Image (cartoon, rainbow, N blue to C red):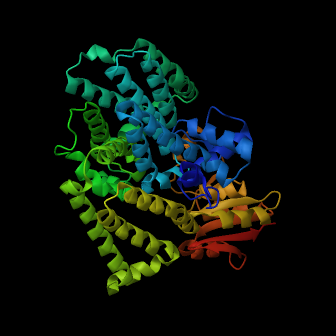
Amino acid sequence: MGVVIFFYRLGAPGLMDPDEGRYAEIAREIMASGDWLIPHLNHLPYLEKPPLVYWLTALSFRGLGDTELAARLPAAVSALAGVFLAYGLGRAFWGPVAGFLGAVVLATCPGYVALGRILTLDMTFTLFLSLGVGLGYLALSRGRPRLWLWAYGALGLAVLTKGPSAVVLAGLIWLAWVLYRRLPLKSLVSPGGWLILAAVSLPWFAWVELRYPDFFRFFILEHHLGRFLTPAMHPEPVYYYVAVILGLMLPWSFLLPWVLVPRGRLKEPNPHRPFLLIWAATILVLFSLSRGKLVPYILPALLPLALLLGEDLAVLLGQWRFAEDRGLKFSLLAWAVAGLGLAVLYFWPPAALSRELARAAGFSPFLPLGLLVFALTPLAALLWRQVGVMFLGALLLSTLVPLGVETVSLQRSPRELGRVLRANWQPGGALVGVYLYSQGMSFYSGRIFHLLDFKTELDFGRRLAPGNGLFFANYQEMAAFAESRPRTFFYLKVHDLPGLEEAFPGKLHLLARHKDCILLYYKGQ
């Protein structure tokens, strides 16, 4: 099941800007340059994130070619491995049935499936962080100190994926658990584990700091602490991630209140439940306090919540009578009401909503199908009083996710423009972005951008590599550059076309257009 969910048509959608295009292009430039230590984007050092996913993607390109399947393979493998990890932890806590059900819950969360089919750093980060946290807990709870070595090794890989936030998150989770159980703090001491963490993660950071002495300030103070403490990038309200978790875990999120308040369903005290709650709550609280927020950041909270759901559903199968569980029936009724309400709004929308639904026409026919499955699943579960009905409905919903990703990619991927550029390229040509930069265009065309000066994610790399000749201060510099090339391709938004036409009156030729982005060319001398 997991293989189908995460790998079916994985390479069909075009890579989407900005994240997929960025990380695929960095990996492509690793392969082209042979520099595996300093990631580059647009031939400039790109040091916002550590390199592990770039390395994995580049290795995937080496084996499978520069394809969408190869680009997304690390994320998909990480997602599937996370499902197996959920099974392993659930089995260790409560037995194979609870482990299996927890794994299935995780594998059928549409948000988890979607993020497992997209090239980002977050799924790989979540896998290594969850592995480290889980192994550390087993080391604490079962008196197996050797597991600390593996736990810190996994955290080292998480640090190489996204940075030291992995150590902060795991440390806070373990510390909260130790304080909750009133264990001695020395329980957390593992010199051997710390040495493994340092051996895995520090060499790359030390090398980059030696190469670029400003790296530490940028990476730690500006990029990590700055994003956490200031709302300069992606500001959202403090309750943002509560809504995000509920959305990512649909339809299972309707059962979360039932899970969090057992009310006698679980006859014996179970220490694993408080730990999983601490795990999920620590991630939720910490990222909610951050001033900068993005949806994938909260992904590590899904696995512990899925395990809690798996345990309760296993109890339901084993000893609890479905019909007598009022909390479950109330949750299913709330799910049914929400589903039927959404279905009514979709099929009989008010005038204001009709305009919004018209924009989502590309999601037909699977959007109405998904709404029907979403609405009918809880009703069927109440009618037949079978847990399996909920799993079947969630599985059907998760199988629609790949179709949704493909539809979104039609709007956000520059694949067709990149292929047009590659087909029309001439030796000595140049690609110029006019107040517009697309990492995906670089990936698909195999060409880097010259840019009319504006703020981009390349700014730190510009400071590290001055005199790179990739930026123009004004239209005059850009026009002089274009005159020196046999053919210059311009990539821009439609609203910036008048300014470009003033610099090249009557000399621009349209090659292709995608939404509000156009690709033109100019023949120089």
Taking 516 as reference, is 110 left or right?
A: left
Image quadrant in which you'd find residue 356 = bottom left
- Is residue 267 visible in this depiction of the protein? yes
- Name which residue lies at 47% across and 15% down: 195
- Residue 243 in sight in this render: no
Q: Nearer the viewer, residue 339 or 438?
A: 339
Q: Quadrant of residue 461?
A: top right
Position of residue 503 measured from the top left corner of the image (x, y, whole percent)? 64, 71
Residue 120 picture location, percent across and down: 52, 48
In-front residue for pair 185/54: 185
Examine the image and state in which quarter residue 520 appears.
bottom right
Residue at the (71%, 58%) spot, across then down: 445
Whole-percent x, y for residue 367 in the image: 46, 72
Q: Is residue 515 above or below residue 268?
A: below
Q: Position of residue 113 (x, y in %)?
A: 48, 53
Front-most of 243 and 514? 243
